[in-house]
Image (tube, rainbow, N blue to C red):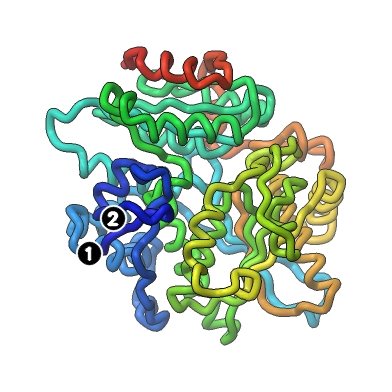
């Protein structure tokens, strides 16, 4: 399969799309078509790697990675994927579940896709090729997942940009704790500033000749594709119980994870409405309420990994529905403010016996609103991060400690260092030209 740019001037094979990250014309790579999928064909897939190898095979067809795909899936996606029942408040309430995506090495959903991208790029790297810099902007979780996936991986270095003071203390510690071939920079600005810097660097042809680079943000097609697979795997397991399409509620910042859910539905999986659960950053809710898509300056919230005012993947979403009315495509978006996040964390623990992170709380609030409005369809919530990553928010509200998972606890014991960086592009160029410490 070929991949085209949303800007309309580039066509590339999968290897080129993965390696470059951003299309040369400044657009984002998208598959030239979405393959149709027979959901019954997944019946024999017992594990997520098996499901992913089946789902992703059409995208990898005719590429240099086609034969390697099953091995990539086994290496990258062999992570726990529990599906937890959300206890209903009424006996008549339709079933709802949490898809726990936070059991990877950095306790966030982005571990799945970051590991997949790293495994793919490693296989594409030719012997003796120059070191490639993986440049990534993060609002909290992406950077640590990418750092973990590429840490000490020969032929790669990672440069992580995060907004200083706008990620949780544990997220910041993770970002600076890897060392070796991973460098973390505290940018004086917000996530949108970090994302702007990354896009500019990836489009700087002169710089790319000196410093070969790729992206590991959700602007990379290599991050987007594997996320389709865990929705397919979960819905395949649950649809036999419901015998009806399952609505998905996805906490959303840069829109990559939710776009993967929408793509899974468009490929033919039994998915119903897809709800984008955002925080106080309202670009998406305002659009789906009938306004223009009008990116705003990012607002800092308790759900900081979703503090995105200009979600990049809206460009891909608009391209996907370029011949249809996007507002009539079974997608809606809701905005949950900090007060409601706090309230939902407490209520979810007290009434349902579940501790959730601030991002998952946005989705839980959306579920509660649906039930109050009489929507009693089966629903699956993407639980995107372990609540222990946000102990400064969650623990005071619940009045108890949330023990971090083993991998996160080990990382928190490591020393951590991040370099200060202005949001001026010249400062980033100078930093990128400095040699790797490994």
Earlier in the chain: of badge 1 and badge 2, it is 2
- Residue located at (45% from left, 23% from top): 178
Residue 207 bears which disc, if any? none
The quadrant holding residue 432 is: top left
Mark 1, other Cα within 10 Å: few <14 / some 14–19 / many ≥20? some
Q: Quadrant of the N terminus?
A: bottom left
Front one among 17 and 157: 17
In the image as oriented, which residue stretches furthest toward the front? 9
| Element assignment for label 1 | loop
Residue 61 marker: 1
The image shows residue 262, relative to residue 118, as above or below, that is: below
> Residue at the location (69% across, 36% down)?
390
| Residue 97 seen | no
- For the C terminus, the quadrant is top left
Q: CA distance from mark 1 to mark 2?
A: 15 Å
Q: Which residue is mark 2?
A: 11
**101 lies left or right of 431:** right
Residue 33 point in image, percent of width and height: 36, 69
Q: Give residue 47's position: percent from left, percent from top.
A: 38, 64
């Amino acid at each position: 399969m070929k991949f085209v740019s949303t800007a309309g001037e580039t066509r590339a094979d999968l290897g080129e799309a993965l390696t470059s990250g951003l299309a040369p014309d400044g657009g984002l790579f998208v598959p030239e078509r979405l393959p149709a999928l027979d959901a019954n064909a997944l019946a024999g897939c017992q594990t997520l790697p098996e499901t992913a190898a089946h789902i992703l095979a059409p995208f990898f067809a005719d590429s240099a990675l086609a034969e390697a795909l099953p091995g990539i899936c086994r290496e990258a996606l062999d992570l726990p994927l529990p599906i937890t029942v959300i206890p209903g408040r009424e006996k008549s309430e339709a079933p709802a579940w949490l898809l726990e995506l936070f059991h990877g090495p950095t306790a966030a959903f982005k571990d799945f896709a970051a590991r997949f991208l790293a495994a793919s790029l490693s296989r594409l790297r030719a012997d003796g090729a120059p070191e490639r810099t993986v440049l990534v902007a993060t609002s909290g979780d992406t950077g640590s997942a990418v750092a973990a996936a590429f840490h000490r991986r020969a032929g790669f270095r990672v440069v992580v940009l995060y907004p200083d003071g706008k990620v949780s203390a544990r997220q910041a510690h993770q970002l600076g704790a890897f060392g070796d071939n991973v460098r973390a920079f505290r940018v004086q600005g917000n996530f949108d500033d970090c994302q702007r810097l990354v896009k500019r660097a990836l489009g700087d042809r002169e710089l790319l000749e000196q410093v070969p680079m790729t992206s590991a943000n959700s602007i990379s097609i290599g991050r987007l594709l594997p996320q389709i697979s865990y929705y397919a795997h979960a819905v395949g397991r649950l649809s036999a119980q419901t015998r009806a399409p399952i609505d998905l509620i996805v906490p959303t910042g840069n829109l990559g994870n939710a776009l993967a859910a929408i793509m899974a539905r468009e490929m033919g999986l039994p998915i119903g409405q897809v709800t984008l659960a955002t925080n106080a950053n309202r670009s998406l809710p305002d659009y789906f309420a009938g306004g223009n898509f009008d990116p705003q300056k990012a607002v800092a919230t308790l759900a900081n990994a979703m503090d995105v005012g200009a979600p990049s993947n809206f460009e891909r979403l608009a391209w996907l529905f370029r011949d249809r009315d996007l507002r009539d495509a079974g997608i809606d978006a809701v905005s949950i403010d900090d007060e409601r996040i706090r309230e939902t964390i407490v209520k979810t623990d007290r009434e349902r016996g579940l501790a959730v992170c601030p991002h998952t709380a946005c989705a839980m609030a959306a579920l509660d609103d649906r039930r109050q409005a009489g929507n009693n369809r089966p629903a699956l919530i993407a639980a995107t991060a372990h609540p222990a990553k946000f102990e400064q928010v969650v623990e005071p509200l619940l009045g108890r400690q949330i023990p971090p998972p083993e991998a996160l606890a080990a990382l928190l014991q490591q020393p951590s260092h991040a370099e200060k960086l202005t949001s001026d592009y010249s400062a980033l160029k100078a930093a990128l030209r400095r040699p790797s410490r490994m």
